[in-house]
């Protein structure tokens, strides 16, 4: 109480107390938030399998099944070979072809999940998101969607300059 000499730590002088400026951690970026959501979604997908799949037992087959599962939530019209609009970038009328996940969305998703796997203790050597079969699948999706929309993807040629090109002196701009 008031007469016993004990004081409330919240009262009195601040003498002898060192105040540290409070450093607020930066909020997670949009990328980090999306990566966390994607990781949780994939984890939930594995738990919902019959029987459930432990993350440690997950392989590229599970990842491929997950990517195919996501197609049902896609918003990109992908024309089938028998469709009158197959190969047309801007079809004049609606059709019954399925909606699928866009290639770019799947590619970005795999990038985030690949990073999340390793951040959550997975080894780069066993990362199912980095498996060659995933790259092949994504390439096939990209090519099939491009054909269905009439867009050709051409492989970019690497600009191979001769080593001596880098050694040539550049003219000075002081003239």
Image: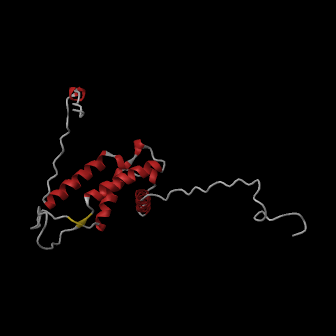
Residue name at image x 24 percent, y 31 percent = 172
Instruction: Locate residue 134 relative to residue 85 in the image: left or right.
Output: right
Q: Residue furthest bottom?
A: 94
Which part of the image, by quadrant, shows the C terminus? Answer: top left
Residue name at image x 20 percent, y 34 percent = 160
- Please provide percent x and percent y for residue 153: 17, 51
- Please provide percent x and percent y for residue 34: 40, 60
Image quadrant in which you'd find residue 50: bottom left
Which part of the image, by quadrant, shows the N terminus? Answer: bottom right
Residue 52 in view, yes or no: no
Instruction: Locate residue 137 relative to residue 57 in the image: left or right.
Output: left
Taking 8 as reference, is 136 above or below it? above
Image quadrant in which you'd find residue 100: bottom left
- Please provide percent x and percent y for residue 138: 26, 52
The foreground one among 107 and 174 is 174
Residue name at image x 29 percent, y 67 percent = 72
**How many numbered marks does the figure carry?**
0
Its colouring scheme is secondary structure
Q: Which residue lies furthest to the right in this view?
A: 3
Q: Which residue lies furthest to the front in this view?
A: 175
Residue 38 in view, yes or no: yes
- Please provide percent x and percent y for residue 156: 18, 44
Instruction: Locate residue 114 relative to residue 4 in the image: left or right.
Output: left
């Amino acid at each position: 109480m008031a007469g016993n000499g004990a004081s409330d730590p919240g009262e009195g002088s601040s003498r002898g107390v060192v105040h540290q400026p409070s450093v607020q951690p930066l909020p997670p970026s949009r990328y980090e938030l999306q990566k966390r959501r994607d990781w949780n979604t994939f984890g939930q997908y594995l738990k919902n399998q019959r029987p459930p799949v432990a993350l440690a037992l997950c392989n590229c087959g599970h990842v491929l099944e997950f990517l195919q599962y996501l197609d049902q939530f896609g918003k990109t019209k992908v024309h089938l070979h028998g469709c009158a609009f197959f190969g047309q970038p801007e079809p004049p009328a609606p059709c019954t072809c399925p909606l699928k996940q866009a290639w770019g969305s799947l590619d970005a998703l795999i990038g985030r999940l690949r990073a999340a796997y390793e951040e959550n203790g997975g080894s780069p050597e066993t990362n199912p998101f980095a498996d060659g079969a995933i790259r092949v699948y994504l390439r096939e999706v990209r090519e099939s969607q491009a054909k269905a929309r009439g867009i050709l993807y051409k492989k970019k040629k690497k600009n191979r300059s001769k080593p001596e090109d880098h050694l040539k002196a550049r003219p000075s701009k002081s003239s």
